[in-house]
């Protein structure tokens, strides 16, 4: 199992955010399987079944990653935290709340972090790389 430790605006685990898509040999090391969902060359999707991690690349650069089991930040797994625990963890940052019918999101924009809260706990932790414009997402992010 890969340890997916997150350094905001830099990397998640062994993958550089905003950096080039990992080489074929590294994809095997990270247990990432390529999935081309939209049939285009613009977006490429990778899935790690064991860790339940999705990495999304745009034009050959890592744009974002979503974690369903574990994303470590300063030794704390963000997946599973409550809303109040998230707010304590990121108390020095501005947090934006987004509402949807079954839950809400907590966005820490300066760090490129979005946490999806379902049933009172973080169920998905997503990070966006610096200098990446994600078309169709709730925000565009550039340093």
Image (spheres, rainbow, N blue to C red):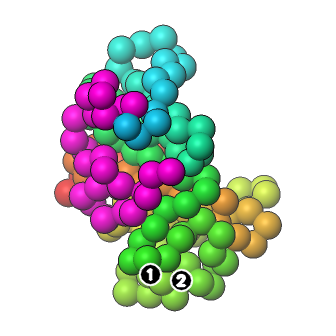
Please tell me which residue lies in front, 49 or 63. Answer: 49
User: Is the C-beta separation of discs 1 and 2 under 8 Å?
Assistant: yes
Crowd rating for badge 1 (residues with CA inside 10 Å; few <14, some 14–19, many 20+): few
Q: For residue 26, which quarter of the picture?
A: top left
The numbered disc on residue 63 is none
Q: Give the range drawn in magenta.
A: 1-28
Q: Which of 93 and 136 is in front in this view?
A: 93
Q: Is residue 116 on the magenta stretch?
A: no
SS class, disc 1: loop
Can you say whether 124 is above or below 97 in the image? Answer: above
Numbered-mark total? 2
In the depicted structure, whether residue 88 falls above or below residue 113: below
Q: Residue at x 36, y 14 (%)?
A: 41
Residue at position x 22%, y 41% from top?
19
Where's residue 71, x and y in %?
A: 49, 62
How crowded pointer 2 is (Cα within 10 Å; few <14, some 14-19, many 20+) is rated as some
Say left or right for 44 vs 126.
left
Q: Residue 63 is drawn in which quadrant?
A: top left
Residue 90, disc = 1
Residue 16 makes an appearance in the image? yes
Give x and y (percent) for residue 128.
37, 51
- Classify residue 69 by image quadrant: bottom right
> Residue 111: x, y in percent?
34, 66
Visible residue check, residue 94:
no
Q: Which residue lies furthest to the top in this view?
A: 39
Secondary structure of the residue carrying tag 2 is: helix
The residue that label 2 is drawn on is 87
Question: Predominant secondary structure in magenta?
Answer: loop
């Amino acid at each position: 199992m890969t340890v997916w430790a997150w350094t905001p605006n830099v990397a998640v685990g062994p993958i550089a955010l905003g950096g080039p898509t990992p080489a074929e040999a590294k994809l095997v090391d990270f247990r990432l399987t390529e999935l081309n969902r939209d049939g285009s060359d613009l977006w490429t999707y990778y899935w790690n079944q064991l860790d339940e991690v999705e990495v999304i690349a745009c034009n050959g650069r890592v744009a974002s990653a979503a974690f369903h089991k574990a994303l470590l930040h300063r030794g704390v797994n963000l997946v599973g935290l409550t809303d109040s625990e998230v707010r304590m963890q990121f108390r020095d940052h501005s947090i934006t709340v987004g509402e949807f019918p079954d839950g809400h999101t907590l966005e820490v924009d300066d760090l490129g972090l979005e946490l999806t809260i379902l049933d009172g706990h973080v169920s998905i932790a997503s990070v966006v790389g610096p200098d990446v414009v994600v078309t169709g997402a709730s925000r565009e992010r550039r340093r």
